[in-house]
Amino acid sequence: MIDISIRNLTKAFEVKKNILDGLTFQVQHGERVGILGRNGAGKTTLFRLMTGEITEDRGDIDIARGKRLGLVSQIPRYPEGYTVEDVLATADARLDAMQQRMRELEKLMSVSDDRAILGEYDDLMNRFEMLGGYDAEVRRAKVANGLDIPPAMREQLFDSLSGGEKTRVNLARLILEDTDILLLDEPTNHLDMRATEWLEDYLLRFKGTVLAISHDRWFLDTVAQRIVEIVDGKAVLYNGNYSFYVEEKRRRYEEALKQYEKNQKEIAHLQKAADDLHLWAFMGNDKLHKRAFSMEKRIERLQKAERPAEEKKLSVRFREKEFFGDEVLWLSEVSKSYGDRVLFSDVELLIEAGERIALVGDNGTGKSTLLKCITGEETPDTGWIREGPSVKDAYLPQLVSFDDPERDMVETMLWEAGCDHQTARDRLAAFGFRGEDVFKTVSVLSGGEQSRLRLCVLMRGDINFLMLDEPTNHLDLISREWMEDALSDYGEALLFVSHDRWFIEKFATRIWYLHNGRIEDFKGGFAAWREFEKRRESLEQTKKAAAREKAPRRRTEPNRDRQRSRVEREIEKAEAAIAALEAEMAESAADYVKLMELEQKKAEADTALEELYIRWEELSD
């Protein structure tokens, strides 16, 4: 069954320039579709057209009869004085109306024996139960907790929230409404990692249809079953997730390039043949002119095919300072609080040369504050932070700023990077700023362009310790890939805060997990760390389940307690050994023989760990 049908959709905001130009595609019921395209390609315009906020110039948008549409980027206006709880409760308007009618029917039944009233009441009660009316408050709490909307926020006035908080609340309201078709415009922008994973899990179980505009590649890889890319106002379709899209797009480009080069060879061959025929025709055989003209018409048709365009890559490289020694940064007994709220305490960490560390954790745990303490923007309450004697650092903050935003890009490079005019133009070109664009003032640049320009300025010195705070935040896919291109050849120490799991997996060799005021230091990449965390969470849940089953509590033999404690220690050692093996496997990805050996060791270690879990459960019974 088709839920959405888009046919020849055309929309222009400027004369003679269609942002959507014959856009056509369909979405089946229950599909999860990722919508991609450059900034300004028309992605958000498509959603606005689908919701009726604006009208199309030509074409048709058909939504299946009876299907309700919900757009997450649209934040409705609510009556003055509405709290977050009031906003969430509006999702149950249907249930509230049914409950109100049931109360009216109850009053009627108390004075009448009319079977029609009783029948209507029974029907309403069954529908109310089927729609989860009796569990509405529990469901509301689950969704709110999953999207990081704590009880304190639910009591706040909705109008007092930040833009990101309003977006989270609106997303929760749409989920609670049980909308048939979800239109998500950058849904993960204001979510931390835990809330994003909760949303992914929800969407994977969602029975309706999902269209998501997103620059979060991990999210698209997890959720999307199909990709629709908007290119020059038209839809290019890919039947797979983001990873499939990347590979297939590359394959299509290479195939088109081969066909173009084949055409060029054929054009050269035909041109020579046509020239020869014309020459021979002048020698007395006029019929050869006709054959030559026929070849030239074919040449004209072949020449209409343009060379396929390839996405431009940055040709940049950080100039790394020669580093003497192993220690880049020490943190000892570092603590930071705001009033009674402790962000982190007793932090003891060391960064060594060449390490790439991702600092992760939920929103508000203090990640950016710790980074600011390291850069000197803030002062820790206790402890000390020191860099190695030959360290030269650079810092890209989350909110990029410049001394004078009214300078153009060339002037900014001359002023802040201290280079000559030609060097400024060369480095700007390497970062994708070319032609007349370099004379744009900094104030008119997008957030992604400003981040790119700041990175360009940072390249002025020889850097061996680079710190980044949410470097890919609010960047489109092209800008994220450019950012990664800029960092890909940088081989010195890197410390960054990020929720971008794709970026973390690509660059991190070590994870600092900040939660409950402490930093857990994991030696390994993101995927290995998440697997470790899942195993630990599973063990904790097993322990809790075992504790519940043991009620009423019985005294266990002292010897049994000692055995269980010993098994728990062995489990911790086994998990640490598996994590180390996974990290070693990541480093040995290019060594097939060693990788096979490590995989065998890991399989044996996994089996041993499962046996320890079973033993622990037996001792806990």
Image: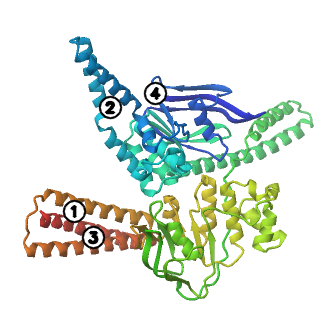
Q: Is label 3 in a helix, a strand or a loop?
A: helix
Which x, y percent locates residue 336?
A: 48, 73
Q: Residue at x 64, y 60 (%)?
A: 482
The quadrant of the image that shows the N terminus is top left
Residue situated in front as seen by the camera: 130 or 288: 130
Which callout, 1 or 2, points at the residue further toward the start of the chain? 2
Which callout, 4 or 1, points at the residue further toward the start of the chain? 4
Q: Residues within 10 Å of mark 3 (few under 14, many from 20)?
A: some
Left or right: residue 518 versus residue 426 is left
According to the image, label 2 marks what residue? 131
Q: Residues within 10 Å of mark 2 (few under 14, many from 20)?
A: some
Give how far apart the Cα atoms at labels 3 and 4 are.
Answer: 51 Å
Q: Is label 1 in a helix, a strand or a loop?
A: helix
Amino acid type, label 4: Lys
User: Decide: marks 2, 3 in contact (CB < 8 A)?
Assistant: no
Which callout, 1 or 3, points at the residue further toward the start of the chain? 1
Amino acid type, label 1: Lys
According to the image, label 4 marks what residue? 67
Which x, y percent locates residue 610?
A: 22, 65
User: Decide: marks 2, 4 in contact (CB < 8 A)?
Assistant: no
According to the image, label 3 marks what residue? 605
Give how far apart the Cα atoms at labels 4 and 1 are.
Answer: 44 Å
Q: Quadrant of residue 54?
A: top right
Residue situated in front as seen by the camera: 29 or 206: 206
According to the image, label 1 marks what residue? 543
Which callout, 3 or 4, points at the residue further toward the start of the chain? 4
Amino acid type, label 2: Leu
